[in-house]
Amino acid sequence: MLEIKDLSVAVNGRKILQDVNLTIGTGETHVLFGPNGSGKTTLLMAIMGFPRYRITKGSVTFKGKDITKLSLDERARLGIGISFQRPPVVRGVRTRDMIGASLRNKEDKVTIDRLAERANLSEFLDRDINYGFSGGEIKRSELMQLLAQKPELTLLDEPESGVDLVNVALIGKLINELLEKDCPLRLRKCMGLIITHTGHILDYVNARTGYVMLDGRVVCEGDPHEILATIKEKGYEECAKCVR
Amino acid sequence: MREVKSAKTYKDRAKRAVTKPAALGEDIDLGTYVSSADEPPYQADPSQLPARAKERMLGAGVSLDDISQRSGTFIQMDNTAVHSSIRQEGIEVMATSQALEKYDWLSDYWWQAVAVDSDKYTAHVELNQSNGYFIRALPGNKTIYPVQACLYLSKARLAQNVHNIIIAEEGSELHIITGCTTASKDEPGLHMGVSEFYIKRGAKVTFTMIHSWNPGTAVRPRTAAIVEEDGLFLSNYVLMKPVQSLQMYPAARCVGDNAIVRYNSILVAAQGSSLDVGSRTILNAKGAKTEIISRAITTGGNIIARGYIEGNAPEVKGHLECRGLILGGKGMIHAIPELKGTLAGIDLSHEAAIGKIAEEEVEYLMARGLTRAEATATIVRGFLRVDIEGLPPMLGAELQRAIEASEKELM
């Protein structure tokens, strides 16, 4: 379970998130909607523990443990994983090395090769990570690394943006594997928190709860399909009106 | 010993250059070094050399206990050749002093790529007790395993003089690993090494040199190569251990059409090390190509990383890439890439970048569960990883091992 209580976050001294409360039960997938600049990415980065995203108030509890003060890598090893929107190119570090690092076993060539095959990235294994990758290749590569890392909580920032229709299906499939969607909820351990603008990913990944973020606050919680329909019809203005 | 043709002329030219400072690098007072050393006995079985010497040599990539994966071996201690052997037909490995006695024609190669009066160091090598290796592949012969050579500086304060000649005859292929090291981990010494490469038509030479000196050693290699039509010269240089002062600027001249020269250099300067290292290619024949790649890391020392490509013939192509990384708060890297073109239709380019490790990259790896130290080490290892085109896989693996062995100390 992930429990976020009264969370406020500042970036470079500027307050971005204010008193955010959110709970994801074991095995559940939740979705975050919100206009650009509303603080969705900041929430994901703060949960992951990036140092630039300073928690000024509140707490993050994961699997019953207060992780508010844990470092980025400690949280990763505890079971939190994130897919980067625009991951950096790391020259000389190959895709193979990144999967090996995520696996915490760089010698396991068989698993590395199999993961690359599943993400349709076999030809990228010996290339520098993210170097010359297209938008879709970056998404698949991020998911492939997460599949190696096997986090219990996966944070996905717009997994479908910049991806063509054929590849959205593959990305949906990889996310479902990552979130153990073929496993009944009562047995499922993996949780997900997904940012989506278009909602396309909901055609492939089943999510239970949706939130709308506006100006650094969670203003609405409900069925993600219903929320998406409202946003499509009336825009975020409607969400602003019904702030609870 | 048979004198080389016009030997007197060389001696005269050298004498006139004995005080001539090098164009680059700190000027070294040769008077503070001794010129001669004892001559250790010849050793037919290199595994019988003293254990300590073998251990130091191994640190420079020279393996003596098992030479089954070597086409030939040459060991020089101070100014004496203590071992030379071959394990493959068509390959010659011997001391240059011996080669000069054996082959009259060797004088046609003597001081032909490097000028004897380049500076006081080349002059000193000509005028004093010296040796070096002669490695040759006969026409059409290809080394299965690399030839290994070691230049070992044993006596404190010695000026080691080396004159190497490497000849790859037409259509041959020669892979060489050279390791240079010292007996002592701190005593001062001076290594002056002249290396002249002659790569004939259609021949290929890969030359991998690993330097492992000590903080008291000054090093002045003087290297040049002449590459004929369709020839390939691939030079890899690794220096990851401390040294006092090292200056070298090898030059390769492409004199035949479609000749190719590639340099890869990996330089690490610890505090107290001063490096002035570069690579030059002169493209003097149609369609000749070159690529110069260097990776420089300072952990507190100073590095001048040079590169020079000159294009003087149609359809030549050259690229120079120099990347530097400053680890920690001290040290300096000065990249000086230079291009000179004298003709329309040539294609020369360069890129140079110096920086620190990007925090964004460290965090990317940490988000996958690596600690900060592990993430940093992975990025540094990646920085040092150069994919060397044309290097046999076995040599590539050895080179990688040598780099990884030193990485631990670096972190």
Image (cartoon, coloured by chain):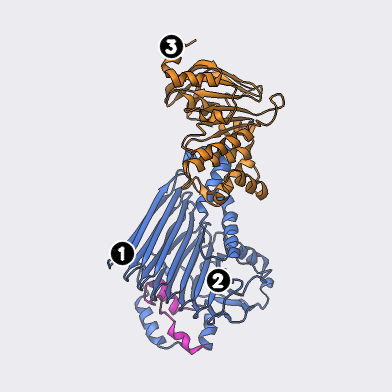
Chain colours: A orange, B blue
- Which label is found at residue B175? 2
Residue type pointed to by label 2:
His
Q: Is residue A207 above or below residue B88?
A: above
Residue type pointed to by label 1:
Lys
Q: Is residue B306 left or right of residue B396?
A: left
Nearest to the eye among marks 3 and 1: give it. Answer: 3
Q: Is residue B16 left or right of residue A139?
A: left
Q: Is residue B380 above or below residue B63?
A: above
Q: Quadrant of the N terminus of chain A?
A: top right
Label pair 3/1, CB-CB below 8 angstroms = no
- Asked where in the image residue A175 lies, by quadrant, the reply is top right
Residue type pointed to by label 3:
Lys
Q: Is residue B248 left or right of residue B410?
A: left
Q: Is residue B224 visible?
A: yes
Residue carrying label 1: B340
Residue carrying label 3: A241
- How many angstroms separate mark 1 from mark 2 (CA)? 30 Å
Question: Is disc 1 on the same chain as disc 3?
Answer: no
Residue ranking furthest to the right:
A187
Q: Is residue A68 inside the magenta stretch?
A: no
Which span of residues is magenta-colored? Answer: B103-128
Q: Is residue A34 above or below residue B62?
A: above
Q: Residue A18, percent across and down?
A: 48, 17
Q: Residue B206, percent across and down?
A: 52, 69
Q: Residues within 10 Å of mark 1 (few under 14, many from 20)?
A: few
- Which label is found at residue B157? none
Please report the residue visible at 55 percent of the width from the left and 71 percent of the height from the top.
B175
